[in-house]
Image (cartoon, rainbow, N blue to C red):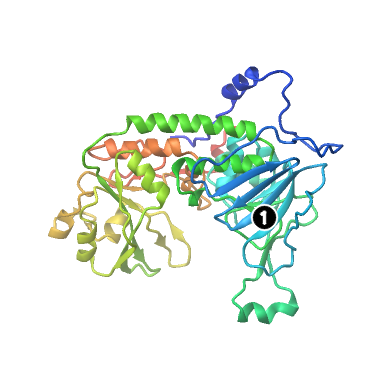
Amino acid sequence: MAFRTVIYTTAALVAAALMLPINVAGNESGCVYSYDPSKDYFPDKVESKYGSGFEITYKGNAKFIRNNIANENYVLYQCGTPIPDGVNATPANSLQVGNWTKVAAVPGSKVVLSSAPASAIIETLGLQNTVAASYKFFTVTSACMQKQLASLPSVDQTYATPSARRRSVASHGLVRRVSYDLGNEGLQWTFTTYGMNDPRSFSVNPENATDMLGKAEWIKFVAAFYNKEAEANTIFSEIESRYNALKKSAPNRATKPSVGIARYNKVANGTIIGWTMVPAQKWLQQGLSDAGLDAYTGDMRSFTNADEFYKAVSGWGILIDTSIEPLSHGGAKVPEWQDLVNGYKLGSSSGITKSAGIKSLQFVDPNAIYRSDLISSTGNATDADEHLQIEPDVLLGDFIKLASSSSGTKDAHWYRNMPLEVPVEWMSPNNCSG
């Protein structure tokens, strides 16, 4: 299965453009050279209808975004017009914890990447040419984005606190000021994955949305930084339609099979020290339910006794594994089926044992153990952090395949069947055909 970057825009956007009245002007594609305070500079707008985690409003020459997940406020104003009256950006040297106000002129044209979902969204919008640099430890799975980033400069993070306040930082539990060193290259801002004490970073957080379609709404969020609201609305509408159509086609059972997330806990010397049951996030609960499945939503529970763990998960029909395989010299590798056999103490290289505890595990015999790392990169990235986060329609399709299979599916887009030993699809720049 080749790496999949969905091109939503070509035919749909041409058709949409043909339907527009000839005299309708959209959002500006660059800076303007005069300012009219009575003008609506953003006739194309987006809104958040689902549980995305952000809110956006428009007024004149500005967009006001509240990122509730990162606890930050963003004011985006049309390049070539003034910053709106009453807008005060949090000073760059502030020790304020959270609720920063950050201000930027749009549209973006020279940005830094430190967010896998933002990278996927930029590709979806066809805006790869706006990426001018990346954080030096940033990795992605997209082969073409890997190729592009390899040719671009990288930036460091800097950690600093004004010297007069250093003692109070420790005594009051404040955090040190963290920022990206954008230098003098004309770089505008960094798309990152969490709120930072950096006036030129903007957090992109579809992984924390509470709704499946809310994840895709982050395409609208990123599009607002480029004045590409019209394109984002078209893309989102397509995703929404496909999602709802798939939802109608999902298996309809009186009793939904149960899905649980778990991991074995291994230390670097290879010793298994326990097992953990992990409750599904709200968006995952919804997606599994829409596919005809029932997610485990109880407390996070840890076990040091295998039989007690088996008893706790015995009702699960499908296991989604999130374990990591630590390496003795540091870092980790992607687990394979034999690693899971050993990690969950299911047997040995000769096969699964038939102990009473293991016989109680419903997910073993039907080959219903999966991991979301089917598409990964040699740089230790996985597409579960990238395109999976903004394509809920494709994700729902995966869940329906998991729900519909009686002996394990091998053709999911992101979910790798472990007992059937589906191999990882390793992405590198060599996979880029563009």
Q: Is residue 257 left or right of residue 7?
A: left
Task: Say which amino acid is labelled 1.
Answer: Ser
**Residue drawn at the location 31% of the way across and 51% of the way down:** 337
Looking at the picture, does residue 418 appear above or below residue 398? below
How many numbered marks have been drawn onto this rendered protein structure? 1
Looking at the picture, does residue 251 appear above or below residue 368? above
User: Could you tell me residue 125's position as x and y percent?
Assistant: 61, 35
**Residue 127, quarter of picture:** top right
User: Could you tell me residue 96's position as x and y percent?
Assistant: 66, 68
Mark 1 burial class by Cα count in 10 Å: few <14, some 14-19, many 20+: many
Q: Is residue 122 left or right of residue 304?
A: right
Q: Is residue 160 left or right of residue 411?
A: right
Q: Which residue is mark 1?
A: 201
Name the outermost residue toward the right: 34
Q: Is residue 410 something one can see in this rendering?
A: no
Looking at the picture, does residue 231 appear above or below residue 308? above
Quadrant in which the C terminus is drawn: top right
Residue in front for this viewpoint, 304 or 342: 304
**Residue drawn at the location 21% of the way across and 39% of the way down:** 254
**Residue drawn at the location 74% of the way across and 74% of the way down:** 162
User: Could you tell me residue 118's position as x and y percent?
Assistant: 59, 46
User: Could you tell me residue 238's position as x and y percent?
Assistant: 51, 29
Q: Secondary structure at mark 1?
A: strand
